[in-house]
Amino acid sequence: MRILLFTGKGGVGKTTVAAATGLVLAARGLKTLVMSVDAAHSLADAFDRDVALTDHAHGTTVAVSENLWIQEVDVTEEIGRHWKDISGYITTLLAVTGVEEVLAEELAIFPGMEEVSALLYVNQYAREKAFDVLILDCAPTGESLRFVSLPPTLDWYMKKLFRLERSILKVARPVAKKMTDLPLPPDRYFDNVQSLAQKLEGVDALLKDPKTTTVRLVTNAEKIVIKETQRAFMYFGLYGFTVDAVIVNRLLPDGVHDPFFDKWRKTQAQFLEEARGYFDPVPIFTLPLRDDQVLGSAALVALGRDLWAAKNPADSFRSDPPYRYAKKNGKYVLTLDLPFVDKHEVDLAMASGDLIVRIGNVRHHIPVPRMLAGHAPSGAKVEDGRLTVRFTGPEAR
């Protein structure tokens, strides 16, 4: 199964591009699902269908044309399917503290539930080989980074803390009951967490395999938007994902010659040229501004044809892994493709056997092979869009 993630700054047109791509793939005979993992769903709106309001369609797949289905993940539905014991405990805990029952149920939907629910579907569809292509219409960039960072975070929690927490609670439960009226998590709470972890097993490797999964960044030819796209490109690389295309949307068409738009045309030309230099060798695809809103299958099909022309959107346009380990002159070296990174922004540390790379306010754990056990980062350099980290063994320190 091929997995395509479409993301970008809010309002750039990523949902429209994702929907149009789905129609192009379906027309090629590929069984395709476009799944919205954005809490503010607009996928059904793009097809001009009121899918979200039909009783049978809450959070499920809905056919919109031959070979094409859409799905808007509904966290309230997913609670009953996957989060019942976890949400139930949190609701009870909030109710004990004096929060009204209805508000407690609402507050029990905490950040991350929607993203994990979407990951459960991704893993399920991959295991079942349910579709040829899965397109994820992701939330704006910041939330998308949280989405892709969840699998390693959950894996770390299950390996480092879960068993310890459960063991401690078994011992502490009798004492705690005598000291407080607050309810403690029941065993079924931990069983629910463990079940979710098992259902997610393997999803991180699936999403980080560039032959299976790639990210496509949708942007506009404006300074602020291009800058955010640069940061997204860097951060997705930091998290181990491969960006294989950048789509510049809403360029002024050649046929518009009104003097009112002259400055806009020059601005867009400037930032389009800069984008080509920034993202090379990642291919840049362009879309002109339409003469009306893109709404409904006919308009989406036209946009998809303009975007991909003779190319197959299911192809991978870049498959180089974002980071690589190697041994040079007897020293271990990690190379990360992080365009636009400034060496003064980079901090390195080791913790629990992982390399922690911090760039600005974003921190990520990169797994370190067993051969580097006991090694520590001894230096780093930034050159040609690559961050190279050198490791020193204990005998050299």
Image (cartoon, rainbow, N blue to C red):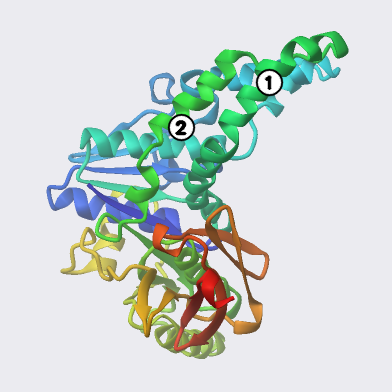
Label 2 neighbourhood size at 10 Å, few (<14), some (14-19), many (20+)? some
| Relative height, residue 99 to residue 245 (above, below) | above
| Residue 190 coordinates in the image, percent (x, y) | 56, 21
Residue closer to the observer: 5 or 24: 5
Residue at 59%, 83% (x, y): give it: 342
Extreme-left residue of the structure = 29
Q: Can residue 184 be seen in this view?
A: no
Which residue is the site of mark 1?
169
Q: How far apart are marks 2 and 1 (CA)?
A: 20 Å
Type of amino acid at the residue the image marks with label 1: Leu
Residue at 47%, 64% (x, y): give it: 236
Name the image quarter holding residue 304.
bottom left
Q: Is residue 395 visible?
A: yes
Badge 2 marks a residue whose secondary structure is helix
The mark found on residue 212 in the picture is none
Type of amino acid at the residue the image marks with label 2: Ala
Residue at 33%, 31% (x, y): give it: 61
Left or right, 214 with reference to 179: left
| Residue 30 coordinates in the image, percent (x, y) | 16, 47
Camera-nearest label, 2 or 1: 1
| Relative height, residue 66 to residue 220 (above, below) | above
Residue closer to the observer: 132 or 159: 159
Label 1 neighbourhood size at 10 Å, few (<14), some (14-19), many (20+)? some
Which residue is the site of mark 2?
197
Residue at 40%, 48% (x, y): give it: 204
Placement of the C terminus among the 4 image quadrants = bottom right
| Relative height, residue 63 to residue 6 (above, below) | above
Name the image quarter holding residue 224.
bottom right
| Relative height, residue 369 to residue 72 (above, below) | below
Residue closer to the observer: 253 or 282: 282
Left or right, 263 with reference to 123: right
